[in-house]
Each structure stands twice: as structure tokens, then as C-alpha cells.
Amino acid sequence: MDGWEKRTYGELASRIDSEPITGEKRGETGEIYQYEVQFFWDGEPGLAVRVIGSIDDGGWRAYFPLTRSFIRNPANESNANPGMTKGCS
């Protein structure tokens, strides 16, 4: 998610209503992980963007993937803690 957290509000907002970004990534131990990144309005359209990323190993974890999210507002401010909206109202 670090790469997405560095993107501007405009870059993130332009991804809303598009297909999720999906792919595979190899871990340090050689295990293959599937990931997905989605983009939504966090409430009213045109205001804050919520970005949600999830990753799993294709096993039982696919039913309960690890997720992380952040919110970016039009002033390019991001929440300090994933899952919280501090500074993005």
C-alpha cells in the first residue's frame, strides 16, 4: 500500500469506478500472494477517497484476507492511522 499512499488525491480519485487492480506478488520465502486494490468515495462523491488493499495466499486466507486502508482528502491530507478518518473530514 505504500506506493498508493504516495499518490495524489487526483490520481486516486481517477481510479474510482474502475476495475480493482489485481495481481500476484512473490514473498520473501517464494510463496505467491494475490492482491487487490480498490478505490471508493468515502461518503459523498467528490470528497475523500478511501483506498482498500487486500492480500491472501490463495489458501484459507482467501476467505479472510489481510486488509489495509487509508483515506485521502482533496487537500492531499491522509489519515494518520489506517482505518481512521483523522484529518480527512
Image (cartoon, grey):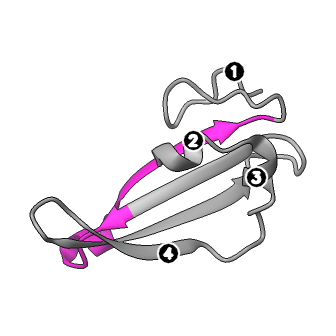
- Write the residue at 65% across / 39% down: 71
Left/right placement of residue 31 relative to residue 19 reads left
Q: Earlier in the sequence, mark 3 or mark 1?
A: 3
Mark 4 and mark 3: Cα distance apart in space: 17 Å
Question: Where does label 2 land, which residue?
Answer: 5
Up-down relation of residue 86 to residue 67 (above or below)? above
Q: How far apart are marks 2 and 1 (CA)?
A: 15 Å
- The residue singled out by tag 1 in the image is 87
Tell which circle, 4 or 3, labels the residue nearer the N-terminal end. 3
Q: In which quarter of the image is residue 61?
A: bottom left
Disc 4, SS = strand
- The mark closer to the camera, 1 or 4, is 4
Q: Specify the farthest residue to the left.
A: 29
Q: Which of marks 2 and 3 is nearer the N terminus?
A: 2
Q: Mark 3 points at which residue?
A: 11
Q: Which residue is drawn at 63% across and 22% down?
A: 86
Q: Hey, what amino acid is under mark 2?
A: Glu
Q: Disc 3 residue type?
A: Glu
Q: Element at badge 3?
A: helix
Where does the image place residue 63, in percent across and percent down from the top left?
31, 73
Numbered disc in front, either 3 or 1:
3
Q: As shown in the figure, which amino acid type bears the numbered disc 4?
A: Thr
Could you tell me the amino acid type at mark 1? Answer: Gly
Residue 21 lies in quadrant: bottom right
Residue at disc 1, secondary structure = loop
Q: Which residue is drawn at 65% across and 30% down?
A: 78
Q: How crowded is mark 1: few (under 14 residues within 10 Å), some or many (20 or more)?
A: few
Q: How far apart are marks 2 and 3 (CA)?
A: 11 Å
Picture coordinates of residue 40, whole percent (x, y): 71, 57
Is 50 above or below relative to 55? Answer: above
